[in-house]
Image (spheres, rainbow, N blue to C red):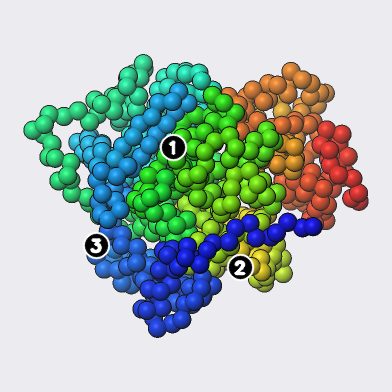
Amino acid sequence: MNPDPVMFRPGAEQVARSRMSELMRAVASATGRPIPDYAALQRFALEDPARFWSLLLAFSGLVHEGDSEPALLGDSIELAAFFPGLSLNYAENLLASGPGREDDRPALTACDERGVVTRLTRKELRDRVVRVARALRRHGLEPGDRVVAVVRNGAEAVIACLGAAAIGATWSSTATDLAAAAVLQRFAPIQPRVLFAHRRLLQQGQERSLDAHVGEIVAGLRSLELVVSLDDEPFEFESDTAQVLTLEELTRVTTAAVKRPAEFEWPRFSFNHPLFILFSSGTTGAPKCIVHGVGGTLLEHWKELVLHSALTPEDRLYFHTTADWMMWNWQLSALVTGAEVVLFDGSVSYPSEDALWRLVARERVTVFGTSPAFLQYSRDLGHVPRERVDLSALRAMMSTGSILHDSLYDWVRANVGELPLQSISGGTDIIGCFVLGNPTLPVMRGEAQCVSLGLDVRALMPDGGFGAGPGELVCAAPFPSRPVGLFGDTTGSRFHDAYFAQNEGLWTHGDLLELTPSGGARILGRTDGIINVRGIRVGPAEIYSVLTHVPEVVEGMAVEQIAPREPGGSRIVLLVVLKPGLVLDRPLTLRIKKELKARASAAHVPAVVVQVEEVPVTLNNKRSERAARDVLNGLWPKNVDALKNPGILHVLRDHPELAVRPGHP
């Protein structure tokens, strides 16, 4: 008998008291239009977007100044502008006081592997943020200046980020385990003035110094004027261009020189003022420097966190992330809801293999964000979390990073509890979600509950029309969290080429989408060459860049292959063409993997390295990762006629190390 397709169904009272239902009632009252359910609300949002976004801003209560009309100028998704007369401050909104956000309420709890816990109230967090903001001002930082960070997932990183945002600086961060060359590839183009960094790394119970790592980054960023250690002690290096301080030294001033933190005046910035620069994993070149604005980020995150995720001041949110993933920025925005944000710096399997579940139980987390890879890891270990720890506080789970298969919904229901498991998907490019949860709808196995409110998400079919899919995920109307642009792209040509050139007039995201009869959606994978293994996005171009340091390799091609026995359900396969006469032996394989780990990260290391005579290329000599990926996943490529060397597909299909299913031509 087939499992029940409904994993969870909210009760009538739960639906009625949700903020999503409250918004339906408010829109119905303001427009005189019946809004009986989410589908009706979405229809209104798409039919009258200017009115919808204006009503949503008013309903949100976000702190702003200026004219909120017009809400939307233009209907071109590439060029439209939201709230051109509006000004606001991201940090002010996250840290403001009010009902449910009183000063003495908990705001941030930061935990690490060693069991060290830092707890801050909303007032304590706000005061520390203001001290950093004032200190950065004293050092001459201006709105729009770039601040970068190499940080662990701790309270200091949050304080530094919000301190920069408070004065209009633009924040970018990476985790501490990304190789220096990869960090520089991201940070150098944006010419930062300030670097915040931790000087110690915790990993599986071991602590190691990051001085050499950060020192190499500082040496490569000649634009830096200030380097700040977020740990107690200073860095053990000097810079000939930048002042090197600890956070305590940065914020230390005489009492007479500073007003009380409560008197800090929050400057307001235009809706599209740059807030974050995030970095894509490109398929053919260096990561894109994606600029996200203050207003679009804040309004979209408020919508996703308050309406779709139903966060309230009574919640404690923990999302497992690092500082180089957009989910770090997303969970930071949860402070705007009044919820407490729980951070964790460490491994999911230390000091015990169920360490993450124990954290969720110990901190009484109510909403737990994770990935399919972690759920499969727990399942493969035979864990029954609800029997091992007390999960009575947990009311909802979220999952993102890769495909959440039906069987994992069943595992959560059987081993965690009767609660909604929300599959959410969007990404770095929009700093938010195209599909996600909804407190007014049932959770169907294998499906995201709905398309994000106000976003005209469609499945573009091969014939150029729209349908249920599977098809290319596109967005057909303007949305606030569309990036401001790409840093340094003064003409907008690179921005256009990245998102609009493939399908003129549509935002093309790179995901394969199926829209379901229930109103939900399934994300079926990527349509470009991005690799997503264990929830970590890896750009093949970053792998190819490292291969230039292996002289034996003439060419490489990295693709993702479905591998059900692997954590996360897939693995990286690296095809290499070697210089004539050379053979791929174990020492060379190990050296390739060592270079990738050292110069990129452990996530870039392939599970399998295979020598081939050539890689698939098109008739105009462009590499076809799509063809290789298809054949390695048991599919016969549709573009065989466009290949210059189709015979290589048979070689890949029949290769003994690649375990491709037989049965294709």
Around disc 1, counting alpha carbons within 10 Å, would you say few (fewer than 14), some (14 to 19), or many (20 or more)?
some
Q: Residue furthest left?
A: 256
- Answer yes or no: is residue 627 visible: yes
- Residue 363's disc is 1
- In which image quadrant can residue 161 be found? top left
Q: Which mark is residue 519?
A: 2
- The answer to whether 408 appears left or right of 1 in the picture is left
Q: Residue at x 70, y 41 (%)?
A: 569
Image quadrant of residue 475?
A: bottom right
Q: Is residue 319 left or right of residue 257?
A: right
Mark 1 and mark 2: Cα distance apart in space: 35 Å
User: Would residue 541 be visible to someone looking at this image?
Assistant: no
The circle drawn on residue 426 is none
Residue at image position (29%, 24%) is 246
For marks 1 and 2, the one nearer the N-term is: 1
For the residues labelled 1 and 3, the Cα–Cα distance comes to: 37 Å
384 left or right of 498? right
Mark 1 and mark 2 residues within 8 Å of each other at the beta carbon: no
